[in-house]
């Protein structure tokens, strides 16, 4: 019963950790550059999941104030427990945009590498670099 | 006007970056003119700010009028003002240098180049000036993205080096973001000063220690500290000459500043330096890093790789000095941030001049080169003396503080590695100077030195100016430490 | 090397999983994060800014400085892709033309040209064979204006429902990309040229920074929209609401044009002649 309660109350953290390490595995272990870029995207999405999951309140709805009829506010007292924590949502809007921008620059660099070396596997590229190197001397 | 200065230092370069990128469609000369005038304005603004802060003042600027922690705050104290001034002056000195290297593979790309240049400087200045932990992440990503693009336009190896730098840099920045998230779920605030007061009662919590490890580990990855330095030599050796003058001196030093700020003002010295095992581990790692880079310097023969490993060594000086923990060593680490920026600027301008004129960066082929390029030689030798640590250059004074502090704290391995590295630096630089001045003929090399002419005046004047700054910083060390740094530590 | 990497990853994962026992529970409303700072925003957003969407008011007013730099990140990504990739397309050996009434394709070799460059019956097509599909072309032609109106709706209703500048801008960029995918990249570039995309992206970010700088000129601190009350002609609280809307417009313009610019550069590998 204790283990079951523990899992139920912490499952969101376990989800983000597993997703984060899948992304890190892809970035570090895989050879193909596009697989590494996809791993980076998964890794950044895991962090976004972590922040958003800490903003949830069990009785809470979306962080937009409910109107009191005819678009007026301020007649009923605002109950904090009915609205989700808005700060992680704001921070993650910024983080999503930053991860999309990084993805764009990474893809542009991958296109440049492909133009120069005709392949996207990292070991083949390193082999081409080392043979170039010796032929220069 | 004066009280808007903390904001203007960041905003002027931002607006001029947008105007410069857009004005490239009108006329090719406009981006350079806009960049130069904007950097002149913000460099003078940062110097005015520096004079106002002298003596321990802390300026706080509330963005959007909301007081912290509701809004974002910019906090400038002595160390921040020094580093901001260093960033702006390095950027201003490098602008004429970048103009003379625009002809190679960067033709017709003046406008995006100067736009990215100014955005890079905006990001770095903002990192130093901010007082909000999440704002630091956003500015970190601005400077990182523009840095990847500026590095990626070098020779044929540079896109792969830039992509590897991108992967490792993204891991570092995302770990920092995760660390901020851990702090947020335990305290609920994002303002640095308020985190400091709220962490005091819960300092031994495992989440807070994990947050410290994540934040510092992520930033150390971007600062190229020992095990995580694989990205730096290839990236800096293949970057274009026009942009290496701001990327090499500034990126890693601003990351070391972030670690100093996290250790002093966010987590506080109790959490950062309280765990003796962690501090011993970091100081020993720093000593191993210094010895590792010393051997790499002896082994490599390309001038830019040698300078990249010297950067790794200097970062290890600063991190080891901070984690030693006593006042002298931390003063040495703080003053070394600025000194190393000046020294690296001088060396990379000289190395860029040599490699662009000579087209071969192997030092064994430098026979008699210094006689043909006398001013470049003066700059190179001056920078070399500063790195070795000879008075009155600034390198001597920071090494003196670090040595004194580490011997007082009984960190003898670190002190021994400092002396060992100065010795190795002396050997390597005297070897290069000997190659440069004496033209004996070994018969192996193919490239003739005779047709080489001196670098243009666009490069010589910044080089000599940076040499003057190195000597000036050395002579004014006492005043700088007294007015700006010793109050903080 | 790879096995040591896998071992390190598993060890780190174990440390992270062990550490989560200290975190607040799922959905806890008494966690420190929910009690310290966010109640101020929930209780005071109507009083300070008259905007019921709490996320928009934090994003564009309380923490508007972060959003300004986020827009700058998007702009610098577009500028970086342009800087890295853009080049003049190399001379092609073959050109392909399709005769529209009959569907016959011509292949012209050795750099020779058609006798009548601007003819309406012969259209140039990409070197990867693309079949002419009237269903996709006509459907997209009908849908695109409605998606654009939806994008304007999302932008304008950011104060009252989920939405705002970023979301509206991305939806608008999606229409341009849909047009490029359903027809041809050159057709999309004729519609919104690269010069317009890059200039408008800089203009979008300048609208944001300019509105904020106007607050300095009007006498208050940076990004303090209440200083713009005389310009908007309202009282201070409604000036904040109008200021939020003005910067959201800037953000939408910047995001829409930068996404288009990045798409042009990435899909044609910088050459802007043919693409997806």
Image: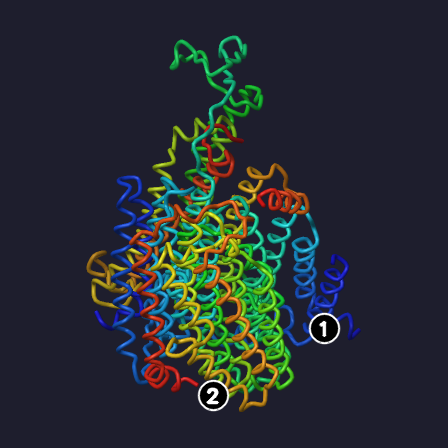
Up-down: is C93 above or below B46?
A: above
Q: Residue at x 77, y 59 (%)?
A: C3
Q: CA distance from mark 2 to mark 1?
A: 36 Å
Q: Is residue B274 left or right of residue B351?
A: right
The numbered mark at residue B327 is 2
Apparent side of residue B22 relative to residue B138 in the rendered image (left or right):
left
2 and 1 marks in contact (CB < 8 Å): no
Expressed as whole percent of the image width and height from the top left, the position of residue B262 reads 49, 76
- Location of mark 1 (residue): C18
Secondary structure beneath label 2: helix
Q: Are marks 2 and 1 on the same chain?
A: no
Compared with B65, C102 (above or below) is above
Q: How many labels, in total?
A: 2
Location of residue C128 (image quadrant): top right
Viewer-proximal residue among C43 and B294: B294
Q: Is residue B221 left or right of residue B121?
A: right
**Callout 2: few (<14), some (14-19), or many (20+) C-alpha neighbours within 10 Å?**
some
Q: Nearer the viewer, residue C206 or B98?
A: B98
Q: Residue C43 location, x and y as percent?
A: 43, 71
Q: Which picture quadrant has residue C20?
A: bottom right
Residue drawn where x is 43% and y is 38% of the image: C148
**Quarter of the image that includes the N terminus of chain A:** bottom right
* Quarter occupied by residue A117: top right
Pointer 2 chain: B
Q: Secondary structure at mark 1?
A: helix
Which chain does tag 1 point to? C
Q: Which mark is residue B194?
A: none
Residue A17 x %, y %: 67, 63
């Amino acid at each position: 019963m204790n283990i079951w309660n523990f899992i139920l109350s912490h499952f969101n953290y376990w989800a983000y950790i597993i997703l984060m390490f899948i992304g890190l595995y892809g970035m570090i272990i895989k050879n193909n550059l596009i697989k590494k870029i996809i791993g980076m995207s998964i890794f950044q999405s895991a962090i976004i999941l972590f922040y958003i999951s800490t903003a949830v309140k069990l009785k809470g709805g979306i962080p937009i104030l409910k109107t009191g009829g005819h678009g007026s506010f301020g007649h009923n007292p605002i109950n904090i427990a009915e609205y989700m924590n808005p700060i992680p949502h704001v921070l993650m809007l910024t983080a999503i945009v930053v991860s999309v921008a990084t993805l764009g620059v990474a893809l542009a660099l991958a296109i440049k590498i492909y133009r120069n070396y005709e392949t996207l596997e990292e070991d083949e590229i390193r082999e081409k670099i080392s043979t170039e190197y010796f032929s220069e001397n | 006007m004066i009280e808007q200065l903390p904001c203007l230092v960041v905003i002027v370069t931002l607006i001029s970056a947008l105007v410069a990128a857009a004005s490239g469609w009108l006329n090719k000369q406009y981006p350079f003119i806009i960049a130069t005038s904007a950097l002149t304005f913000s460099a003078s603004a940062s110097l005015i700010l520096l004079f106002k802060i002298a003596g321990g003042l802390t300026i706080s600027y509330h963005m959007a009028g909301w007081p912290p922690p509701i809004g974002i705050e910019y906090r400038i104290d002595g160390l921040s003002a020094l580093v901001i001034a260093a960033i702006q002056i390095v950027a201003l000195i490098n602008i004429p240098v970048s103009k003379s290297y625009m002809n190679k593979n960067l033709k017709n790309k003046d406008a995006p180049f100067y736009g990215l240049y100014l955005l890079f400087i905006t990001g770095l200045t903002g990192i130093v000036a901010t007082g909000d932990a999440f704002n630091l992440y956003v500015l970190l990503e601005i400077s990182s993205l523009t840095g990847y693009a500026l590095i990626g336009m070098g020779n044929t190896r540079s896109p792969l080096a830039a992509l590897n730098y991108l992967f490792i840099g993204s891991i570092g920045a995302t770990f920092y973001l995760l660390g901020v998230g851990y702090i947020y779920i335990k305290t609920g605030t994002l303002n640095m000063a308020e985190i400091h007061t709220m962490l005091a009662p819960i300092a031994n919590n495992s989440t807070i220690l994990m947050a410290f490890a994540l934040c510092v580990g992520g930033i150390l990855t971007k600062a190229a500290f020992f095990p995580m330095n694989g990205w730096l030599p290839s990236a800096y050796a293949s970057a274009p000459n026009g942009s290496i003058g701001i990327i090499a001196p500034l990126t890693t030093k601003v990351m070391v500043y972030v670690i100093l700020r996290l250790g002093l003002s966010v987590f506080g010295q109790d959490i950062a330096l309280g765990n003796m095992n962690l501090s011993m581990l970091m100081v020993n790692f720093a000593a191993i890093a210094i010895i590792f880079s010393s051997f790499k310097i002896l082994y490599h023969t390309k001038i830019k790789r040698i300078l990249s490993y010297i950067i790794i060594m200097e970062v290890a000086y600063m991190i080891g000095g901070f984690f030693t923990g006593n006042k002298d060593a931390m003063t040495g680490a703080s003053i070394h941030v600025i000194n190393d920026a000046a020294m690296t600027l001088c060396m990379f301008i000289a190395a860029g001049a040599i490699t662009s004129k000579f087209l071969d960066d192997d030092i064994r082929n430098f026979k008699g080169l210094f006689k043909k390029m006398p001013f470049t030689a003066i700059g190179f030798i001056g920078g070399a003396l500063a790195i070795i640590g000879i008075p009155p250059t600034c390198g001597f004074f920071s090494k003196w503080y670090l040595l004194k502090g580490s011997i007082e704290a009984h960190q003898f391995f670190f002190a021994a590695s400092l002396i060992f590295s100065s010795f190795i630096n002396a050997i390597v630089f005297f070897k290069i100077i000997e190659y440069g001045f004496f033209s004996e003929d070994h018969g192996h090399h193919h490239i003739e030195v005779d047709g080489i002419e001196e670098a243009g005046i666009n490069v010589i004047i910044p080089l000599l100016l940076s040499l003057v700054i190195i000597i000036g910083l050395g002579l004014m060390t006492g005043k700088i430490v007294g007015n700006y740094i010793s109050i903080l530590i | 090397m790879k096995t040591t990497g896998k071992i390190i990853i598993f060890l780190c994962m174990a440390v992270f999983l062990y550490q989560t026992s200290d975190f607040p529970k799922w959905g806890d409303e008494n966690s420190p994060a929910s009690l310290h700072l966010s109640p101020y925003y929930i209780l005071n957003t109507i009083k300070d800014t008259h905007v019921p969407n709490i996320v928009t008011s934090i994003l564009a007013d309380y923490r508007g400085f972060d959003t300004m730099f986020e827009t700058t990140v998007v702009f610098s990504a577009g500028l970086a892709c342009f800087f890295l990739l853009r080049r003049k397309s190399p001379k092609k050996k073959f050109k392909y033309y399709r005769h529209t009434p009959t569907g016959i394709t011509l292949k012209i070799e050795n750099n020779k040209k058609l006798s009548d460059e601007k003819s309406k019956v012969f259209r140039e097509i990409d070197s990867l064979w693309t079949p002419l599909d009237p269903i996709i072309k006509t459907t997209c032609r009908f849908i695109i204006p409605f998606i654009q109106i939806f994008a304007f709706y999302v932008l304008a209703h950011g104060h009252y429902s989920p939405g705002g500048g970023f979301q509206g801008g991305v939806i608008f960029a999606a229409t341009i990309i849909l047009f490029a995918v359903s027809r041809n990249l050159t057709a999309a570039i004729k519609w919104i040229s690269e010069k317009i995309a890059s200039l408008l992206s800089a203009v979008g970010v300048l609208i944001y920074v300019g509105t904020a700088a106007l607050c300095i000129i009007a006498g208050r601190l940076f990004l303090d929209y209440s200083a713009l009350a005389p310009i908007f002609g309202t009282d201070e609280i409604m000036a904040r609401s109008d200021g939020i809307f003005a910067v959201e417009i800037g953000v939408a313009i910047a995001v829409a044009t930068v996404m288009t610019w990045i798409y042009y550069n990435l899909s044609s590998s910088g050459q802007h002649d043919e693409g997806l």
